């Protein structure tokens, strides 16, 4: 029995976007925490800690997100932890976001001029205070635009959770399409919904970047 | 844990996986080449003097960059037949990849053109070069040098992203892996090995691009 594509179906898709947003939010918060730890580990003066973090980042960035989802999903069920797509998707996307945010933030920490570290050391601050009171506040300013930019990548990435069976926006599209058999309109609407979620973030990211560039050029003019 | 890992079935079918890896590389390279052409064309449109063309280029780039690749693949494969464009899975996968890459390549090409110092363009114009001559003799080599690293990482990104086209059973590494999983029910083992293969491919291409970059552009550094 083929259903018509009506306002009800549209509403179903819009409601499914909630899960896309929620999954992105969870992965972003979890990835934020993981990424913070990774970034700190990556700039750590302790060699092995830094290499371990670097290896994790390299592996995650060098393999497809889909494979990471599969490994977490099938691995968790082998370990009898959970066979729930929701948990597996949240966990895999958290690891994914950790690696990317860790790498982005490492770059931002290292973009803070070396003299700032030296100045902090000259003030007899210990390593933790050098980081927390001198370096991180400056790194955070640089980090904002690429972090917002990554949020777009993460939002789009959650669509892959549909492949392991988590019902978010893309999965809902398949469900609605199977009932109505109107693939063109269904996938156009789904694309439009993703666009509505992502575009404002993209604009915000490039706006922040421009503002930072202007602020940067002012500082350069000042430095002489 | 009472699960016994069995990698034996994976090694037996390893030649199939190697073929899958080759298909992934070929598909990505083809998509990269065509996507770059689309990217250059769109970058030219974005710099056009006609407003409508500029707007069109911008709509294309923004629409693609703000929607998931998976949705683009499904739209091409499932959606386009409704308007009479029926494609085989591998054609649909290639088309979706080219459309996707075209948008990202546009941004890369634009950045490359911007990287050519304004003074050199002015000098070229002052010498009476036509815009084609300007492009041919002044713009394209420095632009290529500026964007080479970005093109390299874009190739690796599309190679990793191409695993998604397995959902429409286009032939590549992940689709081969899916077939093996369906045959042996050893999902974790198969995907673990395949993940390792992607990692090796990624590292190998990174090293290769770095070597090519050094070989092509090293002598310029003295200039």
Image (spheres, coloured by chain):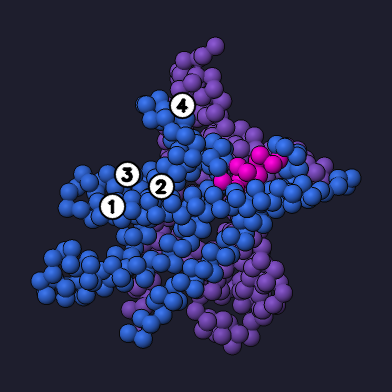
Chain colours: A purple, B blue
Mark 2 residue crowding within 10 angstroms, few (<14) / some (14–19) / many (20+) = many
* In the image: residue A136, left or right of residue B58: right
* In the image: residue A81, left or right of residue B75: right
The disc placed on residue A200 is: none
* In the image: residue B129, left or right of residue B12: left
Q: What stretch is highlighted in magenta?
A: B172-181
Q: Quick check: marks 1 and 2 in contact, CB under 8 Å?
A: no
Both marks 1 and 4 on one chain: no
Q: Quick check: marks 1 and 4 in contact, CB under 8 Å?
A: no
Residue name at image x 56 percent, y 53 percent: B22
Q: How far apart are marks 1 and 4 (CA)?
A: 30 Å
Q: Circle 3 sits in a helix, a strand or a loop, which is it?
A: helix
Q: Residue B21, position in %: x, y?
A: 59, 52
Q: Quick check: marks 2 and 4 in contact, CB under 8 Å?
A: no
Q: In which quarter of the image is the N terminus of chain A?
A: top right
Q: Is residue A126 visible?
A: yes
Q: Residue A95, position in %: x, y?
A: 65, 54
Q: Distance between the residues labelled 2 and 4?
A: 21 Å
Q: Circle 1 sits in a helix, a strand or a loop, which is it?
A: helix
> Nearer the N terminus, badge 2 or badge 3?
3
The residue labelled by disc 4 is A183
Q: Quick check: marks 3 and 4 in contact, CB under 8 Å?
A: no
The residue labelled by disc 3 is B59
Q: Circle 2 sits in a helix, a strand or a loop, which is it?
A: helix
The residue labelled by disc 1 is B41
Q: Residue A53, position in %: x, y?
A: 67, 67
Q: Which chain carries label 3?
A: B
In the image, residue A185 sits, relative to residue A67, either above or below, namely: above
């Amino acid at each position: 029995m083929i259903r018509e594509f009506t306002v009800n179906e549209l509403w179903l898709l819009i409601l499914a976007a909630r899960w896309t947003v929620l999954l992105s939010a969870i992965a972003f918060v979890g990835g934020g925490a993981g990424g913070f730890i990774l970034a700190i580990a990556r700039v750590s003066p302790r060699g092995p800690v830094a290499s371990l973090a670097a290896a994790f980042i390299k592996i995650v960035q060098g393999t497809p997100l889909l494979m990471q989802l599969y490994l977490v999903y099938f691995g968790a069920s082998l370990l009898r932890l959970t066979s729930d797509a929701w948990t597996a998707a949240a966990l895999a996307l958290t690891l994914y976001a950790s690696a990317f945010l860790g790498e982005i933030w490492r770059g931002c920490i290292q973009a803070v001029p070396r003299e700032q570290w030296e100045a902090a050391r000259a003030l007899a601050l210990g390593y933790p205070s050098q980081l927390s009171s001198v370096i991180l506040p400056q790194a955070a300013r640089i980090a904002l635009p690429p972090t917002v930019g990554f949020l777009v990548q993460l939002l789009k990435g959650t669509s892959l959770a549909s492949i392991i069976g988590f019902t978010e926006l893309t999965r809902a599209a398949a469900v609605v399409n199977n009932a109505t058999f109107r693939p063109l309109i269904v996938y156009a609407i789904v694309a439009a919904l993703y666009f509505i979620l992502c575009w404002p973030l993209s604009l915000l990211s490039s706006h922040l970047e421009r503002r930072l560039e202007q602020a940067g050029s002012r500082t350069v003019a000042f430095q002489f | 844990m009472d699960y016994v890992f069995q990698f034996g079935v994976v090694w037996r079918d390893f030649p199939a996986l190697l073929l899958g890896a080759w298909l992934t590389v070929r598909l990505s390279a083809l998509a990269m080449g065509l996507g770059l052409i689309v990217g250059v064309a769109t970058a030219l449109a974005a710099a056009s003097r006609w407003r409508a063309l500029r707007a069109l280029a911008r709509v294309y780039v923004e629409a693609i960059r703000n929607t998931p690749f998976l949705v683009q693949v499904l739209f091409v494969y499932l959606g386009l037949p409704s308007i009479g464009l029926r494609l085989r899975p591998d054609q649909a996968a290639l088309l979706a990849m080219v459309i996707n890459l075209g948008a990202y390549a546009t941004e890369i090409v634009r950045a490359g053109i911007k990287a050519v110092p304004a003074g050199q363009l002015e000098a070229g114009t002052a010498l009476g070069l036509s815009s084609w001559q300007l492009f041919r003799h002044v713009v394209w080599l420095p632009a290529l040098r500026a964007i080479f690293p970005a093109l390299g990482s874009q190739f690796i990104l599309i190679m990793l992203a191409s695993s998604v086209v397995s959902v429409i059973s286009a032939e590549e590494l992940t689709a081969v892996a899916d077939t093996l999983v369906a045959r042996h029910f050893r999902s974790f083992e198969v995907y673990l090995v395949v993940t390792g293969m992607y990692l090796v491919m990624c590292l190998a291409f990174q090293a290769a691009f770095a070597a090519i970059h050094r070989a092509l552009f090293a002598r310029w550094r003295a200039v």
